[in-house]
Image: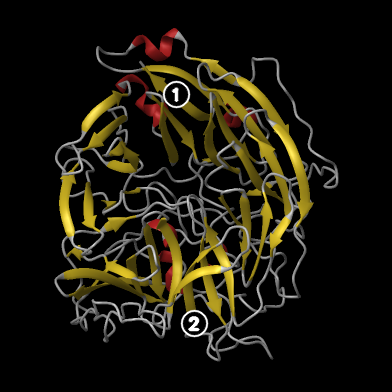
Amino acid sequence: MTQPPSQQPPQGGFGAPQEPQGTPQPPQQPETPPAAPPQMPPAPPQAPPPTQPGYGYPQAPGAQPGYGYPQAPGQPAPGQPAAGPYAQQPGPYAQQPGPYGAPSGPYAQQPGPYGQQPGYGYPQQQYPGAPAPGGSGGGPFKGKPAVVIGAALAVVLVVGGGVFFAVSGSDEVKKPVSKSSGGAVDPSSSPSVDQGDGKGDGREADDDLNAGRKEGEAKVLWLTKNDVDLPRNGADVYGPWIVGDTLVKGMYRSVSGYSLADGKQKWNIPLPADMCAAPGTATADGKIVIGVMNGTTDKADCADLQMIDLNTGKTGWKKSVKKNGTWDMMSDIGLAISGDTVTVGRTSNSNAYRVSDGTELFGKPSGNCQPFAFAGGPKLIAATSCRTDDASNPQHQVQEIDPTTGKAKWSYQPKRGWEIDKVYSVSPLVVSLTQREEKKWSILALKENGTLRSQLVGDKEDKFSVDCGNDFSIFGANLEGCSGLAADANTFYMMTEDDTSGSGRTNKVIAFDLNTGKTKWKSPAPAERTMKPLRMEGGNVLVYLEPSYDKGGAIATIAPTGGAPKVLLQHPDSTTQIENFFSSRTVYAGGRSFVVSDRVSAGSDDEEKEQTIIMAFGK
């Protein structure tokens, strides 16, 4: 690894999180890292400041800060105790590297005050005149632009034969300018359902798309193009969710369902204002609850909840989340579903509702520690912030929550100063933590009872990448949403950053033993290709071989013992330029793959309408 010799990392131990008081100490305590020179991350492309208000931004410039609101260093709000998880967020986290190296993952493109990145998420298909992404859209930034304010250096910390990272630098905080998008819709009106005529905006692939298909390659089954007039800064695409024979996505002011077979739109739900939040998963019977802005001006909050049955495209209950005190920041919420419960997390507040009927199940608990973010699925995991007398030295907890009562089944308390950042896997439980003061990162595996199972340690030469896409928040937090990861009962799988030292980009998938935290094996991608773990499939690791400039993507598997990926579905090379979205999510179901853009950028009417949102491939 080539590194400039002029800087040294901060001194002191890695600071592995500790067990709660009254429980045995974890078996591993990393040693004090020796000094190491920093590594300069690549400069990202520039992006324009946002003009559209919405998810992830302050309600109005100059809003008075409170518990959980970012403060100037050393200046908490008068009379307020220690702030929530993102108070006093330092500038370097605008460019937080992925594990062990250059910027990637949840902090790669921090928007808002920490980087002026437009909107919730990142443009995938560039706005007119914007710089084109380098290469094929891979690399440590995974094709997403970011604005760097000030300088930052990535500093590698070597710990017990493994490698962790730190970041040093400073950011000048600049607030984005909010502006109403116009075209106001009555926010009090209930959404209606357009059942469609079976034509929709999807279309079957024509002969031209499959004309160049070679033997052994899959067909382009269908694709959809954007048919919505978007605000000036574009719009994020939420989902996809697959329920039965329907693929569902949300974007801007609508939620739409498409037939998996032919891409025809089955139903469409118009929304009275911008969609601003969504859970990663639906209930077992196909219901979700989304967040909708409670108005169309820059003073609107992400406070309205709307239940939708994804099977039928029919809306259910709707209600507004009530603010709990002056400092309840409703501009940024995170939704998670576990069983029949949907949680609403933000700053130092939280609520939970029954998905089926909207009944409130529990709210902000009494006591010194308050949950602010959740991850759902087979279990409900909460990140909790405890009030302290020092905002720069927070105390967090990880808890498993009863989804009906809100009571904690167990709590894991890391060493003070470590903050819960993301949940990479709920079962088995794998959690990401960051340490702002020492600017470090740790990935922990916890046991079923909440005690420490292991701390992951990567090899010195490997730099890992986690893609959390448009899953960003400033005032609240969303623990879900990261991809490029997979896990089974005893193994956790991550991808490395793209290696650009050869003639083309390539990377590896690395498996970690969850019982020891050590590397089990490394599987390199095919030459000049990159790959991304999606999930487990029949005991194997399902991966997406990402398209390059002349090679179509593919769905493949890696055996649980490692080795070369085995291709299940090879997408045609002839359509790689369409498939190569600026950034996307990929779903594999029923032998078919669906590549869905994360974001659609605004432009002229023709440019907007020409942007492909979904591509479907199959035999």
Identify whether 344 is placed above or below 220: below
Left or right of 79? Residue 395 is left
Residue that appears at 27% across and 28% down: 551
The residue tagged with tag 2: helix, strand or loop? loop
Residue 194: x %, y % from top left: 74, 25
Give neighbour class at mark 1: few <14, some 14-19, many 20+ (Cα, 10 Å).
Answer: many
Residue 39: x %, y % from top left: 25, 68
Which disc, if any, is residue 394? 2
Residue that appears at 42% across and 34% down: 587
Task: Tell me which amino acid carries mark 2.
Answer: Pro
- Badge 1 is on which residue? 616
Residue 172: x %, y % from top left: 51, 74
Task: Tell me which amino acid carries mark 1.
Answer: Ala
User: How far apart are the alpha carbons under marks 1 and 2?
Assistant: 46 Å
Total count of labels: 2
Instruction: Tell me which numbered mark, 1 or 2, is placed earlier along the sequence.
Output: 2
Work out which quarter of the rendered image holds the C terminus and state it.
top left
